[in-house]
């Protein structure tokens, strides 16, 4: 009796505020702590929050989520929702299979039976390894969880987003001084979902969030179905949950999650084309850039009614209003710059939902393509790779093998990042990286003129070296209009932490004779497991003068007669008569240019 009386006093004092319970899942007894406020009522939300590795539910609830001023229970009491702290088996979580996914499903069913929670407002979060599990659940049970909140954890092998998963609202909270799950890994994980959700690739940033020095809130959105991806960055915080009164993790999670429900009554709308972050690049004299007409396509539906209108905007300019499928509009005559393409769906109840993507129309004279080689394990936007077995397109990440950006960490690396690709089969032109293919999300339009491509290239795991072929190809048909072969003289040695010298910058000059869209193609050698690392790639338009090609020699024969012939560097080429053979390229004779194939 005395023990029961003491327990009651502890509950009243708030020291024991969570009920321990258990449930059998797939033949295994699983335990969890649950807190339900008094006067909860029915159809209230549920938050499930998973502990870190080597922790348990009690530690998460009574230590990580509590101090003298704030507690998760206080948030629950005010907002009236149920919180569950589950226990992982051996104080860890299954981040690749279904063992703990089934546990979460069972908890939801139990809470629906016991507390009559609203199944459409179930939220999942976790700390450290629990955060890793939260990312895993995004792909496994997106139909059961309305919003996800990982804290100080992300998939160590790289995040993935299944194509058939709905747009996912995410709040990620992380300290910049985290020495367990480094802060540098947060953005690559979020980028996968920013891209999947169709969110703007540039965040709106609030410094000193909630008046808390060092707290910075990044918001990407709205994306498809009005979802947002958020990052609450905590300067100087380590691997722990923030419990400051201004930025209390439990309250931040609730304030984010409460905006989302699986059974929203407003319509669903998504932009299917163009892709978020798409770039349209046009090299041309000032004011003469040619950008393609952009066809904007969308899908829209309404679960409890009908879609009445779908409006298309470029910024605030209305492009078209559709009242029936197909939902599409065309943006013509667009100028260089960033364009926010927005679609607004309105249903028969007058409710609206917005989706938007940001695309860039770029008019450079110099383009540093390698500036996007800044994320290890990713394939940058605009790029497509093929290794004779697998084709990858950017933007995508989470790669630990195969074609991808590598980060070099040696004491003296020639460059910090490089794009790696390979040729598994050894057949000619079966290992490559190309910039400007349509599936990579970027188009490259070139006006006739003279161009320079500067590059630094080495081999990754070829002690005897392997040649690399650079080509300028037409996007349609893939025919080459200019090429150069280079033999690297640096091999990194198959280890990213090796030191290596900076490859000498090479120069590839070429002429474009016909306006059109092109791709930059780089091929590894025609040998099994040949490879290449591109560390620098800069495209510059030197001039847009007409090429003045007056005659085409398609059998490699020299220019007519025996007058002097020069290459584009002004060097005289020895030609004595029409039977002499030239290497393919562009030559100058009597002030005119000739193209020899």
Image (tube, rainbow, N blue to C red):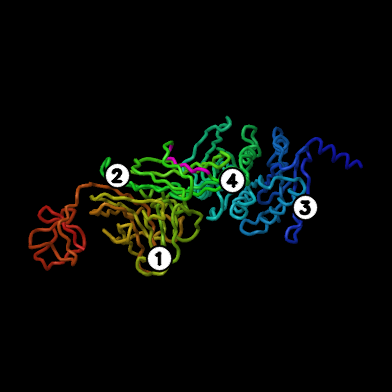
Q: In terms of secondary structure, where does tag 4 sit?
A: loop
Mark-to-mark CA distance, 2 and 3: 66 Å
- Whether residue 184 is visible, yes or no, is no
Residue 553: percent from left, percent from top: 17, 63
Query: Mark 3 and 4 residues: CB-CB less than 8 Å, in contact?
Result: no
Residue depth check, mark 2 versus mark 1: number of the one nearer the observer: 2
Q: Secondary structure at mark 2?
A: loop
- Residue extending farthest to the right is 1
Q: Of the residues under marks 2 and 3, which one precedes in the sequence?
A: 3
Q: Is residue 40 left or right of residue 522?
A: right
Q: Which residues are magenta?
A: 308-315
Graded by Cα atoms within 10 Å as few (under 14), some (14 to 19) or many (20 or more), the crowding at tag 2 reads some
Q: Which callout, 3 or 1, points at the residue further toward the start of the chain?
A: 3
Tell me the residue that label 4 is attached to.
Answer: 305
Report the Cα–Cα distance between label 3 and label 4: 41 Å
Q: Position of residue 501 (x, y in %)?
A: 37, 54
Q: Alpha-carbon distance for marks 1 and 4?
A: 52 Å
Mark 4 nearby-residue class (10 Å; few <14, some 14–19, many ≥20)? few
Q: Which residue is mark 1?
A: 423
* 310 inside magenta stretch: yes
Q: Residue 356: x, y in percent? A: 48, 43
- Answer with the quarter of the image where residue 266 lies: top right
* In this rendering, the label closer to the viewer, 2 or 4: 4
């Amino acid at each position: 009796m005395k023990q029961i009386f003491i327990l009651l006093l502890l509950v009243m004092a708030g020291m024991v505020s969570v009920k321990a319970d258990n449930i059998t899942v797939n033949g295994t007894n699983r335990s969890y702590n649950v807190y339900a406020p008094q006067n909860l009522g029915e159809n209230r939300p549920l938050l499930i929050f998973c502990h870190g590795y080597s922790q348990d539910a009690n530690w998460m609830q009574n230590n990580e989520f509590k101090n003298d001023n704030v507690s998760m229970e206080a948030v629950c009491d005010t907002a009236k929702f149920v919180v569950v702290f589950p226990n992982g088996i051996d104080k860890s979580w299954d981040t690749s299979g279904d063992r703990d996914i089934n546990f979460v499903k069972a908890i939801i069913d139990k809470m629906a039976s016991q507390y009559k929670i609203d199944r459409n407002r179930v939220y999942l979060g976790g700390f450290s390894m629990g955060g890793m599990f939260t990312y895993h659940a995004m792909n496994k049970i997106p139909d059961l969880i309305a919003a996800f909140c990982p804290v100080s954890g992300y998939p160590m092998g790289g995040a993935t987003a299944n194509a058939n998963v709905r747009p996912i609202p995410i709040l990620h909270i992380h300290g910049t001084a985290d020495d367990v799950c480094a802060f540098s890994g947060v953005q690559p994980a979020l980028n996968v979902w920013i891209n999947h959700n169709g969110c703007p690739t540039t965040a709106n940033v609030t410094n000193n969030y909630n008046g808390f020095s060092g707290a910075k809130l990044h918001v990407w959105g709205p994306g498809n179905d009005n979802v947002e991806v958020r990052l609450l960055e905590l300067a100087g915080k380590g691997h722990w949950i923030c419990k400051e009164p201004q930025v209390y993790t439990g309250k931040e999670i609730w304030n984010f999650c409460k905006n989302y429900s699986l059974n929203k009554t407003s319509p669903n709308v998504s932009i299917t084309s163009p892709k978020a972050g798409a770039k349209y690049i046009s090299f041309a004299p000032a004011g003469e850039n040619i950008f393609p007409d952009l066809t904007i396509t969308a899908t829209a539906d309404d679960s409890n009614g009908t879609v009445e209108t779908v409006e298309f905007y470029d910024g605030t300019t209305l492009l078209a209003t559709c009242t029936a499928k197909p939902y599409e509009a065309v943006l013509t005559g667009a100028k260089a710059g960033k364009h926010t393409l927005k679609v607004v769906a309105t249903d028969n109840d007058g409710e609206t939902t917005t989706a938007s993507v940001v695309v860039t129309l770029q008019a450079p004279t110099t383009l540093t393509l390698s500036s996007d080689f800044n994320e290890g394990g990713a394939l940058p936007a605009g790029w497509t790779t093929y290794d004779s077995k697998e084709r990858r397109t950017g933007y995508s990440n989470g790669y630990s093998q195969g074609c991808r950006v590598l980060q070099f960490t040696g004491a003296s690396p020639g460059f910090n990042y490089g794009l790696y690709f390979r040729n598994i089969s050894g057949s000619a032109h079966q290992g490559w990286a190309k910039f400007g293919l349509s599936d990579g999300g970027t188009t490259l339009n070139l006006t006739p003129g003279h161009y320079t491509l500067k590059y630094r290239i080495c081999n990754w795991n070829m002690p005897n070296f392997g040649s690399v072929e650079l080509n300028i190809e037409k996007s349609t048909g893939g025919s080459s209009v200019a090429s150069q072969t280079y033999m690297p003289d640096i091999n990194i040695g198959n280890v990213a932490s090796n030191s290596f010298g900076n490859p000498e910058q090479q120069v590839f000059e070429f002429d474009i004779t016909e306006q059109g869209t092109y791709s930059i193609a780089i091929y590894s050698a025609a040998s099994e497991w040949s490879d290449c690392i591109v560390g620098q790639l800069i495209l510059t338009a030197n001039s847009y003068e007409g090429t003045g090609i007056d005659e085409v020699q398609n059998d490699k024969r020299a220019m007519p007669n025996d007058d002097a012939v020069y290459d584009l560097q002004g060097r005289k080429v020895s030609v004595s008569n029409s039977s002499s053979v030239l290497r393919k390229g562009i030559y100058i004779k009597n002030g005119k240019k000739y193209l020899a194939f």
